[in-house]
Structures are given as structure tokens and as C-alpha cells.
Amino acid sequence: YIQSCTQCSKFNITRRKPPGLLQPIEPPNEVFQILGLDRWGPTTPSHDGNRYVLVITDRLSGYVIAKASPTNTAQDTAR
């Protein structure tokens, strides 16, 4: 596909799947029923050698827990 080609721009077919419909997410009934997890980093190492932050957010209350860790591996996240 060449955008400057008039034949290409006129007859080019879209090869992407159209986006699906948004699905509503049921709100949680209790605190800590649904959590959001995110990693932030790498950053400058702290004096303890931590370079990443795991951020956990409760979807109902908005309560946030931030935990520093030296790596962003699944093993550190599970601890």
C-alpha cells in the first residue's frame, strides 16, 4: 500500500479487524474484591537497592498500596 498512489488509496481494503464493543464491568461488592496492579520503574536505585514500585489499587475504595522492590519479576510480585 502506497498512500500517494491514487489507485492504492481508492481500492485498498482494510486488513484490520474492527474493534469490538465495550463490555460493562460490574462494580465490586466488597473492598479488595477487585484489585488493579501496576509496575512503575525502573528508577534511580534507593539506598536499599529498590528500582521498581508495585502499585496496588482497590477498585471500590480507591485505596492504594505502593511497595518498592529491586526487580520487576513475577517472584518479587508474588512476595
Image (spheres, grey):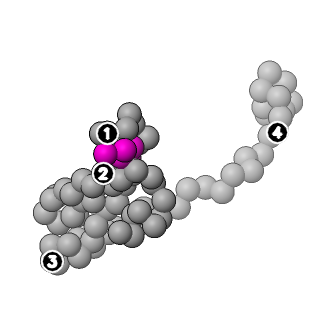
Question: Which amino acid type is marked by label 2?
Answer: Ala
Query: Which residue matches tag 4?
Result: 11
Q: Which badge, 4 or 3, is on the more N-terminal residue?
A: 4
Q: Which element is circle 4 on?
A: helix
Please name the residue shown 45% across and 54% down the image. Answer: 72
Q: Which badge, 2 or 4, is on the more N-terminal residue?
A: 4
Query: Which residue matches tag 2?
Result: 68
Q: Which badge, 1 or 4, is on the more N-terminal residue?
A: 4
* Cβ atoms at labels 4 and 3 below 8 Å apart: no
Query: Which residue matches tag 1?
Result: 46
- Observer-side mark, 3 or 1, equals 1
Query: Which residue matches tag 3?
Result: 30
Quadrant in the picture for residue 32: bottom left
Please name the residue shown 69% across and 52% down the image. Answer: 16
* Cβ atoms at labels 3 and 1 below 8 Å apart: no
How many numbered discs?
Answer: 4
Please name the residue shown 37% across and 38% down the image. Answer: 45
Quadrant of the image containing the N terminus: top right
Q: Main secondary structure of the magenta part?
A: loop
* Cβ atoms at labels 1 and 4 below 8 Å apart: no
Q: How far apart are marks 3 and 2 (CA)?
A: 26 Å
Quadrant in the picture for residue 12: top right
Quadrant of the image containing the C terminus: bottom left
Q: Which element is circle 1 on?
A: loop
Q: Is residue 55 magenta?
A: no
Q: Can residue 63 be seen in this view?
A: yes
Neighbours of disc 4 within 10 Å: few (<14), some (14-19), many (20+): few
Q: Which badge, 1 or 2, is on the more N-terminal residue?
A: 1
Find residue 55 and name its label. Answer: none
- Observer-side mark, 3 or 2, equals 2
